[in-house]
């Protein structure tokens, strides 16, 4: 991976019936940010500029349906066991 590439990772769907969401993280070299879908916001940030954070939030909003769809397929036990 190149240092200028932003890496995205996300959890399966977590939370209770009224608080279902996907935890999302972005990394780029030493920069790191964590967010949630919904509400498509970044809650923790280390190193990304304000403009970059807005771009990450825009990305979450524009791709929330695809990310959520893919998160539904994640089996937490299989992921935990490395399968």
Image (spheres, grey):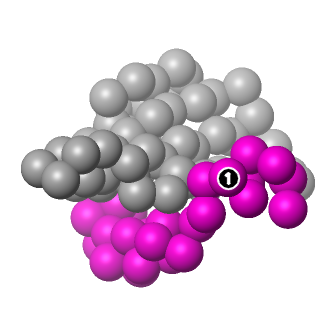
The reply to whether residue 5 is visible in this rendering is no
The reply to whether residue 9 is visible in this rendering is yes
1 or 17, nearer to the observer: 17
In the orientation shown, which residue stands out farthest toward the top? Answer: 46
31 or 21, nearer to the observer: 21
83 or 35, nearer to the observer: 83
Picture quadrant of residue 65:
bottom left
Percent position (x, y) of residue 14?
38, 48
Give the labeled residue for mark 1.
Answer: 77
Mark 1, secondary structure of its residue = helix
Specify the segment rendered in magenta.
59-83
Percent position (x, y) of residue 20?
25, 53
Q: Which secondary structure is most common in the magenta stretch? A: helix
Please report the residue visible at 67 percent of the width from the left and 52 percent of the height from the top.
77
50 or 37, nearer to the observer: 37
Please report the residue visible at 58 percent of the width from the left and 30 percent of the height from the top.
32
- In the displayed structure, would residue 65 be above or below residue 32? below
Residue 27 within the magenta-colored segment of the rendering:
no
- In the displayed structure, would residue 47 be above or below residue 2? above
Residue 76 within the magenta-colored segment of the rendering:
yes
Which quadrant is the N terminus positioned in? Answer: bottom right
- In the displayed structure, would residue 49 be above or below residue 54? above
Picture quadrant of residue 64:
bottom left
Percent position (x, y) of residue 72?
45, 71
In the image, 62: left or right of 46? left
Please report the residue visible at 24 percent of the width from the left and 46 percent of the height from the top.
16
Picture quadrant of residue 73:
bottom right
Which quadrant is the C terminus positioned in? Answer: bottom right
Percent position (x, y) of residue 45?
44, 24
- In the displayed structure, would residue 50 be above or below residue 1? above
């Amino acid at each position: 991976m190149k240092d200028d590439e932003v890496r995205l990772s996300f959890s399966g769907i977590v939370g209770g019936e009224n608080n279902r969401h996907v935890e999302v993280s972005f990394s780029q070299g030493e920069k790191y940010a964590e967010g949630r879908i919904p509400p498509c916001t970044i809650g923790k940030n280390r190193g990304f500029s304000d403009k970059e954070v807005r771009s990450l939030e825009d990305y979450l909003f524009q791709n929330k349906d695809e990310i959520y769809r893919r998160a539904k397929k994640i089996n937490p036990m299989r992921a935990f066991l490395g399968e």
